[in-house]
Image (spheres, helix red, strand yellow):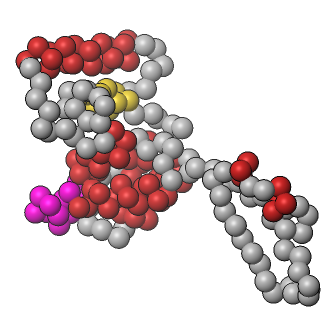
Amino acid sequence: MDGFEQQDNILIVGATNLPESLDKALKRAGRFDKEIHIPLPDIKGRTEIIQLYLNKIYYDSSVDPEILARGTTGMTGADLSNLINQAMLNAVKNGRTACTKDDLDLARDRILMGVSRKSMTLTDEEKMNTALHEVGHTLAAMLTEGAMPIHKVTIIPRGQALGVTQMLPEKD
């Protein structure tokens, strides 16, 4: 930023997720006049970030960083760090020293859909209706040419959903 004296050894960097809300005076020449857009990581980037965080914990051979990356589209590096931490906390809570694929799936579900609502009581009819609903999603995906592969189908209530059918994209 322009000041009273010329100093070449000072660099000021700012960051925002809402550049449109910045005062125009901040973006004038000589101030914050350069914009560098940093997109969310693609599947390759997410795989590398996941591997970086996995290298900091113990995990078993069921964990495949690339498959995990396929199911985390739209997540930032911080989101992926949180995912690994949540998974490891679940492993420790269950008396294990190594994180499993199931721990990571549980953490992903928790982050994307919320905690499971174990206290929610559903009648057998409600469970059946939810199961039939999810079967409909599953069949539609399986019978639709070019649809993403099915990853998981569940009727465990999470967040606002009574069940979910998850597909796993092959690429972004």
Indicate left or right for 158 with 53 as reference.
left
Q: Is residue 100 magenta-colored?
A: yes
Q: Residue 112, position in %: x, y?
A: 37, 42
Would residue 159 be found to the left or right of residue 33 on screen?
A: left
Q: What stretch is highlighted in magenta?
A: 90-101
Relative side of 142 to 89, left or right: right
| Quarter of the figure with the C terminus | top right
> Depth check: 90 or 43 in front?
90
Q: Position of residue 43 (x, y in %)?
A: 51, 46
Q: Residue at the location (66% across, 51% down)?
A: 18
Q: Where is residue 33, by image quadrant?
A: bottom right
Q: Position of residue 6 (x, y in %)?
A: 92, 86
Q: Is residue 8 above or below residue 158?
A: below
Does the rendering let one see residue 50?
no
Where 120 sits versus 141, above or below?
below
Tell me if residue 63 comes above or below residue 57 in the rendering.
Answer: above
Q: 37 or 47: nearer the eye?
A: 37
Residue in the picture at 10% in, 29% down? 121
Quadrant of the frame with the N terminus = bottom right
Which quadrant would residue 148 be assigned to in this image?
Answer: top left
In the image, residue 137 above or below residue 80: above
Q: Residue at x 43, y 44 (%)?
A: 72
Task: Give the percent coordinates (x, y) of residue 90.
Answer: 20, 57
Q: Does the magenta stretch include residue 116?
A: no
**Residue 37 is at least partly visible in this image:** yes
